[in-house]
Amino acid sequence: MSATTPLVEVEAIARRYTMKKGVFGAPIEVRAVDGVSFSIRRGETLGIVGESGSGKSTTGRMVLGLEMPDAGTVRFDGAAIPPIGGAEWRRQRARMQMIFQDPLAALDRRLPIAAQVREPLDIHLIGNEAEREARVVELLRDVGLSADHGRRYPHELSGGQRQRAVLARALATRPDFLVCDEPVSALDVSIQAQVVNQLIDIQAALGLAMLFISHDLRVVRQVSRRVGVMYLGRIVEEGDADDLFATPVHPYTRALVSAAPHPGRKPTERIVLTGDPPNPADRPSGCAFHPRCAFAVARCRVESPVLADLGAGRQVACHLASPAGAGGVPTGPKLPALEVA
Ligand code: SF4
């Protein structure tokens, strides 16, 4: 497989759940993820950003094979994800690891850190006794922890140290692909930068492919080369990270970017999203964003926009977005009624 061939290929995956509205309510179908496609090459990071309820985490779980999609396919290194629990699935899982938001929940409180970092080596029968011991020391060092940290229990470490321990454990099997789901959201802001920088360094050194899921644009921007913006189970905009944050096209992306702290931006330039946050159980007709969109026209209420390639490496799902002109960038809807704070 060449370096340019995607390591991870996700094609139109969908996940639906059935839930009841109230005790006596009729069952309703919730489309948590609805036709998401993307690919990630070796050494590349795709950031997925969106509010709670946008389907980011469900997407990450399906990509890892922890949940099977109701429709669509996930391919890893050219092969479909095998059925969960089998020997082939375990073999593939050793090459695909996940880092969750809460490191304390991800660690066993009754075991010292070193034993937990070693666990994947024991499970996958990697190396002999001495080699596993040496590998644990190496892994702890790679994430900025000492052998002394390895002797401690999870509650004896800080939040940042715990997340480093989780990262060390995830790297034990020398994976090719990491899914990070809100990996620094539970940490103090001062610690977040350290852990993110560590992750970037390790990813670059090992050439890992990474799917980085977060609601925090600032962090996603720092980590990702490409970014997909999710809203109610769908990607509404995808493109090069720097370009997308410099010239967001979709009205939802524009609102998210305007709300992210930026040294040169005045508070008055912030676009305020009106209406309720996304609720997958109550999906609006047409463009799901239309109740909150300052640009919505009649068509938006009845017709769902498709994710279209607008040139300059940008894909956008908006009826009013325009393709890039010669050498330019795509543009979003222009209306006088932009709501500003
Ligand atoms: Fe807004 Fe319409 Fe574009 Fe949806 S399709 S983002 S409602 S302008």
Image (cartoon, rainbow, N blue to C red):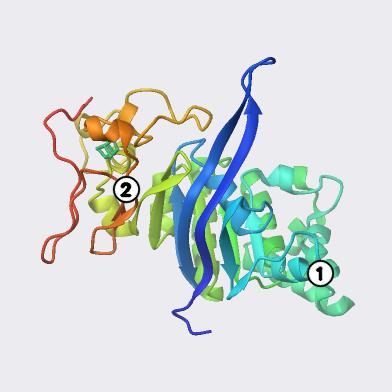
- Residue 192 in picture, x, y percent from top left: 51, 48
Q: Are marks 2 and 1 in contact (CB under 8 Å)?
A: no
| Residue 182 in view of the camera | no
Closer to the observer: label 2 or label 1? 2
Q: Quadrant of residue 293?
A: top left
**Residue located at (32% from left, 44% from top):** 305
- Residue under numbered circle 1: 87
- Residue 341 in picture, x, y percent from top left: 23, 24
**Residue located at (76% from left, 63% from top):** 147
**With 7 as the anchor, is 274 left or right in this view?**
left
- Residue 120 in picture, x, y percent from top left: 79, 65
The residue nearer to you, when weighing 286 against 120, is 286
**With 282 as the anchor, is 149 left or right in this view?**
right
- Residue under numbered circle 2: 317
Q: Amino acid at mark 1?
A: Ala
The quarter of the picture showing ligand 1: top left
Q: Tag 2, which secondary structure?
A: loop
Mark 2: is the Cβ under 8 angstroms from ligand 1?
yes
Q: Quadrant of residue 188?
A: top right
Using the image, determine if residue 332 lies above or below residue 118.
Answer: above
- Residue at the far right: name it: 129
Q: CA distance from mark 2 to mark 1?
A: 40 Å
